[in-house]
Image (cartoon, helix red, strand yellow):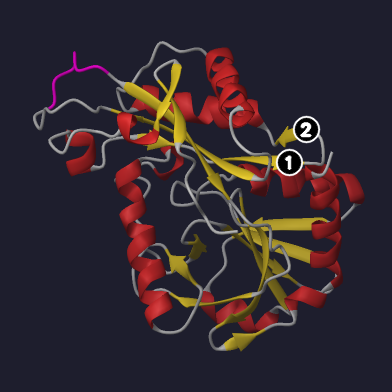
């Protein structure tokens, strides 16, 4: 199974063919990246879907849209019904749900009265939680959250992630770890970073430059419930050799062990703390 977009979407209150929801080539959302999106996992568990922390995702989408001046009239309940109706029309499998808020009209110059569109896309997604990844330290600096708020999931901000991921792949890595303006570790291109010691987990503390991921929050809840110590603090690249494991966490990626943050290597897949997190996370998402 590949990452394939479903042929129908929920668009402004009804199901339509995917291309009917496209923005105009003259839309300023397309040209300037002025839009907000979110990512939600819908897990097919034999006879029904489990959608992880849906309210948190929809609240985050609305928060970002409101702050961007992209207010929309559909309630969270409307969006939930839209997701349910979309899934009912698609073959049962695991889907990555991508709601996006944007302006589709052919207007390059911004006007406050321009209508806002909301579309919900479903993408088939394989679950390969055990696949390890490699990474390095990116030469691209993490965009400052004081310049463009990274917590709003603004479409244009992810050019920063694209450039970092593309550069990593050209060098033979799967992903990149990004540093802030002070040289401190923030996260990967689209995932939070967790570093493993023998019995302790260390993760960068939240700053305006680090995305407060919902999967990150889930893992902190898991750690608290099963008694794993998690330390949130500043981390610098020269500390990476002190750890014996690392993994990434995000909605689409879920949990992925890292074998490398170049030049450091880890046996993360077999680390007891990673295996424990993975077991607990799978139990949550296979309800």
On the image, numbered disc 2 is attached to which residue?
48
Let me know if residue 187 is in the magenta part. Answer: no
Q: Position of residue 90 (x, y in %)?
A: 59, 35
| Nearer to me, 35 or 145 | 35
Q: Position of residue 81 (x, y in %)?
A: 59, 17
Query: What quarter of the picture does the N terminus occupy?
Result: bottom right
Residue 205 visible in this rendered orientation of the protein:
yes
In the depicted structure, whether residue 60 falls above or below residue 6 = above
Whether residue 6 sits left or right of residue 165 in the image: it is right
User: Is residue 76 or residue 200 the one in the foreground?
Assistant: 76
Q: Counting other residues with Cα less than 10 Å from the Cα at mark 1, is it few (<14), some (14-19), or many (20 or more)? A: some
Helix, strand or loop at label 1? It is: strand
In the image, residue 111 lies in the stretch drawn in magenta? yes
- Residue in view at x 61 percent, y 43 percent: 95
Position of residue 189 measured from the top left corner of the image (x, y, whole percent): 46, 61
Depth check: give the residue in front, 36 or 204.
36
User: Which circle marks residue 88 in the picture?
Assistant: none
Q: Marks 1 and 2: in contact by CB < 8 Å?
A: yes
Taking 44 as reference, is 82 above or below it?
Answer: above
Magenta stretch: give its range: 110-115
Q: For the residue carrying disc 2, how many other residues have a C-alpha within 10 Å: few (<14), some (14-19), or many (20+)?
A: few
Q: Residue at x 36, y 52 (%)?
A: 158
Residue at the extreme left: 109
Q: Residue furthest right?
A: 226
- Disc 1 target residue: 44
For image coordinates 18% across by 25% down, the residue present is 105
- Spot occupied by residue 269 in the image (x, y as percentages of width and height): 76, 74
Residue 148 occupies quadrant: top left
Horizontally, is 267 left or right of 172 in the view? right
Helix, strand or loop for the magenta stretch, by majority: loop
Picture layout, residue 116 above or below residue 19: above
């Amino acid at each position: 199974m590949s990452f394939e977009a479903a042929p129908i979407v929920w668009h402004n209150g009804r199901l339509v063919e995917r291309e009917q929801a496209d923005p105009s080539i003259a839309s300023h959302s397309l040209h300037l990246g002025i839009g907000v999106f979110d990512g939600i996992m819908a897990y097919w568990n034999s006879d029904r879907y489990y959608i992880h922390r849906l309210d948190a995702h929809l609240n985050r989408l609305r928060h970002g849209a409101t702050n961007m001046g992209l207010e929309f009239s559909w309630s969270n309940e409307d969006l939930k019904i839209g997701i349910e109706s979309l899934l009912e029309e698609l073959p049962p499998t695991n889907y990555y749900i991508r709601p996006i808020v944007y302006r589709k009209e052919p207007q390059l110059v911004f006007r406050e009265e321009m209508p806002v569109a909301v579309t919900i896309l479903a993408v088939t997604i394989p679950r390969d939680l055990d696949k390890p990844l490699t990474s390095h330290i990116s030469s691209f600096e993490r965009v400052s959250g004081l310049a463009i708020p990274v917590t709003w999931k603004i479409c244009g901000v992810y050019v920063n992630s694209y450039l970092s991921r593309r550069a990593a792949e050209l060098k033979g890595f799967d992903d990149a770890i990004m540093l802030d303006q002070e040289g401190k570790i923030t996260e990967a291109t689209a995932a939070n970073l967790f570093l493993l010691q023998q019995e302790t987990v260390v993760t960068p503390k939240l700053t305006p430059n680090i995305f407060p991921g919902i999967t990150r929050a889930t893992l902190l809840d898991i750690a608290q419930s099963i008694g794993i110590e998690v330390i949130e603090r500043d981390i610098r690249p020269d500390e990476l050799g002190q750890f014996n494991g690392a993994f990434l966490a995000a909605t689409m990626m879920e949990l992925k062990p890292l074998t490398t943050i170049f030049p450091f290597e880890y046996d993360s897949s077999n680390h007891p703390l990673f295996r424990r997190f993975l077991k607990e996370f799978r139990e949550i998402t296979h309800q």
